[in-house]
DNA sequence: CTGAAAGCGCTTACAG
DNA sequence: CTGAAAGCGCTTACAG
């Protein structure tokens, strides 16, 4: 056993958390050089680097994020900012971000907020001033909020937006990266599926028009139908707000009319579940009497009877990609990454009943 | 305008983030004294304190958490550690913790993990070694994991556990605080409700017996029935694992027998939803032919048709209480706080059908 | 390719 | 009740 090993043994017997000074001493170099290794500086002799890496591994040294952060003038925290009521969506996003953060030394700080509150911007300003975040990921719908984007630009916080509409609220910014979900692709698939099943009396329950997603989804549904010479019946075109209650009420209106639809397209699964309830109360069987499709592939989708045909977005992947844009050592020049939604066929869609 | 105000004006025109040095200079004291004010040290003259507070407010000084953390040898981050598939539960817990953290200068770092993985403990050790957290909150079921508790003790991380069973895995520890949910209270209410409705053929679909909650809930259901001289029929006592699928399968077994139950008690709402599906497929109407009750008041509960009678736990409040135990300046001597669940009656429970 | 000095913004001893 | 010095564990800017 050489002297260096002895010293390492001695250090280990102290059972103390290692610091950069321990590594420097044990490796016989200055702490500046250790710092270079930690930060992957190229200008370190290979042998020096190897020796230092060896010591780091032996004493399981992990640089203290607070000390690094203080010196760097930024933290190793990624903020996730959102105002979204869909719990599964939020949890998936968190998981996706964490997938990418694992092993990078960064942690995830969650920050739900209240878009409607007067305190919305001041509260976020306070949050951002307090922590000097490594970056933030903003989820729909507030990823479209101009005031929030301006605030982030002003504070020079790197950010990635997750949106349903390319280029929305866009302008030259400090690091305006974006993950865009193509909601319309899967919607077009879904409505084409319905047209191919022979449906012609097709009803619609739309999403909250304040959200870009509501427009994108409608655009997709219309396109898929148009492909087959079909369209939403103008007299069956109901507005909803993405809630179960709004889907239920719209479903009641649609299903109690004499010339009721044979299929109802819903802009999300929550409203589709509401439509199920209306159908159930009207004594209509799904899918024999009525076809229903939704969007989200929410947990409720395959718990409904029958399981709901819907459109799925790769939520977790999107979050992973968003985190990657923030973390990636070589910031890519691509600023808009796009992901497609896709149709998931289950038991709620079937051939149109014979007239 | 006096000289001090002038200087503050001058500082503000710099548009620079304030530091403790700015406050000290502007208030004409040492930074040590400013530090005393920040940390509420009693030994500061009232007039001195007021002057400093005034400057702090004027220039909106916020101490840098990283610098404070480095000096304090701990961060201002609260960790939330869990392995739980229920998205709404997780989101509610996060909201509750954040309710209490707001304004304290602490942030929430979420850390889902995989209880089943071989890497479970090593991964958590790495996490805890990296960050020097101000404290952690552990959610069920891993709040019962002995290895995790030992790890936290070894690393001297303050912790609060959220559990369904008082005293589980308990032993003298560094700061073994605990929020205990009395699942059994609401369960007893629920089963008493069923007994009072006249049901006598009562089936049961149980939770995963690896989780304390499964035992606590069963205990409550049994007690509520016993109050009225009733009990789960031994031949209708099904095991489940809290999943929709397990509820569905158990429901099928229960409902296809000739002497089927008139009421089914489920250890959670997911399984109750599975039982709904089995009932639907057997052509049984809820609640006319079959009464069903669940536990959780999950989002699905009032989206089912009819809405599910269930038991609600004040999840968000529990999280708030847990965070409070960690944050509270005067650590309370009470180490076990208890909260009750309660019955929520909806449309899925009705009088037993006439034999 | 490597290092000594100064600094990031705070706090803990130690004085007085 | 208040302060000057040293330190938390890192990095930057400057040398060499």
Image: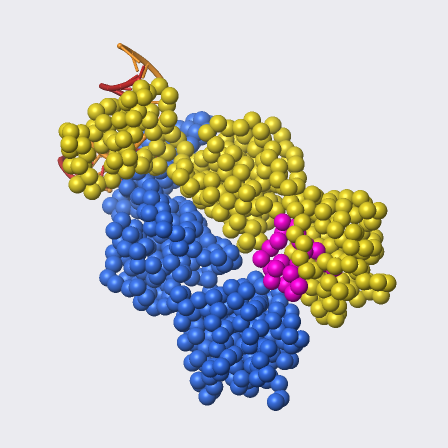
Chain colours: A yellow, B blue, C red, D orange
Quarter of the N terminus of chain A within the rendering: top left
Kindly tell me whether residue A4 is visible in this rendering: yes
Magenta stretch holds residue A293: yes
Is A148 located above or below residue B42 in the figure? above
Is C5 located above or below residue B353 in the figure? above
User: Left of A225 or right of it: where is B283?
Assistant: left
User: Left of B201 or right of it: where is A202?
Assistant: right
Q: Please tell me which residue lies in front, A44 or B344.
A: A44
Q: What is the count of numbered marks?
A: 0
Horizontal and vertical percent for residue A256? 79, 66
Q: Residue at x 28, y 22 (%)?
A: A48
Is A93 located above or below residue B64 in the figure? below
Determine the image quadrant of residue A255.
bottom right
User: Left of B153 or right of it: where is B209?
Assistant: right
Quarter of the C terminus of chain A within the rendering: bottom right
Is A264 located above or below residue B306 in the figure? above
Residues rendered magenta in the picture: A291-312
Q: Residue at x 42, y 61 (%)?
A: B318
Q: Residue at x 54, y 45 (%)?
A: A316
Q: Please tell me which residue lies in front, A1 or B341.
A: A1
Q: Please tell me which residue lies in front, B119 or D8.
A: B119
Magenta stretch holds residue B248: no
Horizontal and vertical percent for residue B107? 41, 46
Q: Residue at x 52, y 58 (%)?
A: B88
Determine the image quadrant of residue B46.
top left
Kindly tell me whether residue B291 is visible in this rendering: no
Horizontal and vertical percent for residue A145? 61, 40
């Amino acid at each position: 056993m050489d002297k260096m090993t002895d010293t390492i043994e001695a250090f280990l017997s102290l059972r103390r958390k290692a610091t950069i000074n321990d590594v420097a001493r044990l490796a016989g170099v200055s702490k500046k050089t250790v710092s270079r290794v930690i930060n992957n500086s190229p200008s370190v002799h290979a042998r020096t680097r190897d020796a230092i890496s060896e010591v780091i591994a032996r004493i399981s040294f992990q640089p203290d994020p607070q000390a690094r952060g203080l010196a760097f003038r930024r933290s190793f925290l990624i903020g996730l900012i959102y105002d979204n009521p869909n719990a599964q969506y939020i949890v998936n996003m968190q998981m996706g971000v964490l997938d990418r953060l694992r092993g990078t030394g960064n942690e995830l700080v969650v920050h739900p907020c209240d878009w409607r509150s007067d305190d919305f911007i001041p509260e976020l300003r306070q949050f951002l001033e307090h922590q000097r975040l490594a970056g933030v990921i903003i989820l729909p719908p507030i990823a479209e909020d101009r005031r929030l984007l301006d605030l982030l630009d002003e504070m020079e916080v790197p950010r990635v937006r997750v949106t349903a509409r390319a280029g929305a609220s866009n302008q030259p910014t400090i690091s305006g990266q974006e993950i865009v979900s193509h909601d319309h692709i899967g919607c077009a698939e879904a409505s084409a599926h319905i047209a191919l099943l022979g449906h012609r009396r097709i009803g619609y329950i739309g999403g909250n028009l304040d959200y870009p997603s509501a427009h994108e989804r409608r655009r997709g549904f219309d396109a898929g139908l148009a492909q087959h010479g079909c369209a939403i019946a103008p007299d069956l075109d109901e507005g909803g707000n993405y809630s179960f209650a709004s889907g239920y009420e719209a479903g009641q209106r649609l299903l109690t009319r004499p010339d009721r639809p044979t299929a109802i397209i819903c802009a999300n699964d929550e409203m589709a579940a509401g439509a199920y309830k209306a159908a159930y109360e009207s004594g209509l069987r799904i899918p024999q009497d009525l076809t229903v499709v939704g969007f989200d592939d929410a947990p409720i989708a395959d718990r409904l009877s029958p399981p709901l045909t819907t459109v799925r977005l790769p939520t977790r992947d999107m979050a992973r990609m968003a985190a990657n844009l923030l973390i990636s050592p070589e910031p890519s020049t691509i600023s808009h990454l796009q992901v497609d939604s896709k149709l998931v066929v289950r038991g709620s869609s079937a051939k149109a009943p014979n007239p």
